[in-house]
Image (spheres, grey):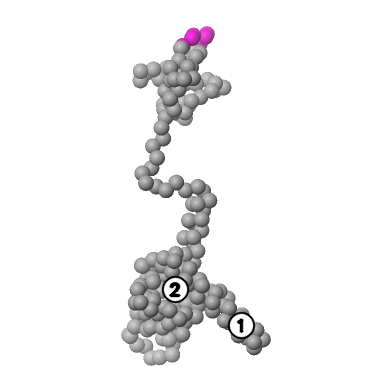
Amino acid sequence: MGYNGTPILQIDGKNLGTFAPDSPKLPIGATFAATLQPDGSSVILKVNPESINLPEVPLPESEPKLDTAGQFRAIHRELWRKEMFDNLVGAIATTYKQRQANQSASNEIEQFKIGSHWTAYVQPSGDFIVRNEGKRTICRGNLQTGEEIFTLSEERASELESMILERERLLHRKHELSHNGHHISSQDIELN
């Protein structure tokens, strides 16, 4: 049992007293057999080591035990995945604005390619959906709010990352051939 943060000893549910500050303590909830021996104003417990029964800590149900590195990786992965989603949203928003600027206001759904495999469909409300060649949804969200409605999976985020890297390689090759032009940062995603 704990009492104001100090472990206390109980016998048959009655409080016997708290541990002296410098005496060894057992974890809260432990049970043991001991003989009691009065000593001035205190009582000395002679604990039978065989009898010590440490409390069992109930483990949370079906939660994978993660080491902190694993947790850190999970958090890191989630941040990276979200960053890929944000990059995608930024790229779609930029292209959408350009499209809108190049034509008189239309209420049509804009659609354009992302890399060579994906297509983005954007509604005037800012809602967008990205699908792959097989018409499967990659992700869904809203450009205005940046909200993620249909999550970009890690697998898809990796696909997106490799598209970006592939594009950088191609740009770099072009760049080396022409020796002019500016280098494009990894935030840019090919939309055509």
Indicate left or right for 150 with 188 as reference.
left
Whether residue 131 is visible to the viewer of this picture, yes or no, is yes
From what the image shows, is residue 68 above or below residue 99? Answer: above
Residue 40 shown in magenta: yes
**Residue lying at the far right of the rendered structure:** 179
Is 54 colored magenta in this rendering?
no
Q: Is residue 89 above or below residue 58?
A: below
Q: Between label 2 and label 1, give the one nearer the viewer.
A: 1
Q: Position of residue 149 (x, y in %)?
A: 36, 67
Tell me the crowding category of disc 2: few under 14, some 14 to 19, or many 20 or more residues within 10 angstroms, Cα based: many
Residue at which label 2 appears: 89
Query: Looking at the image, how many numbered discs can be counted on the residues?
Result: 2
158 is higher (above) or lower (below) than 6: below
- The quarter of the image holding the N terminus is top left
The secondary structure type at the circle numbered 2 is helix
Q: Which disc, if any, is residue 173?
A: 1
**Whole-percent x and y of residue 47?**
48, 17
Circle 1 crowding by C-alpha within 10 Å: few under 14, some 14–19, many from 20:
few
For residue 95, what is the image quadrant? bottom left
Q: Where is residue 113 drawn, in percent x and y?
A: 43, 82
Q: Residue at x 51, y 58 (%)?
A: 76
Residue 32 drawn at (x, y percent): 43, 20
**Residue at 64%, 88% in the rendered image:** 178
Label 2, label 1: how far apart the Cα atoms are: 26 Å
Mainly helix, strand or loop, the magenta region? strand
> Looking at the image, which is closer to me, 85 or 16?
85
188 or 77, which lies in front? 77
Q: Is residue 94 above or below residue 105?
A: above
Mark 2 belongs to which amino acid? Val
Q: Amino acid at mark 1?
A: Arg
At mark 1, the secondary structure is helix
Q: Which residues are magenta?
A: 36-42
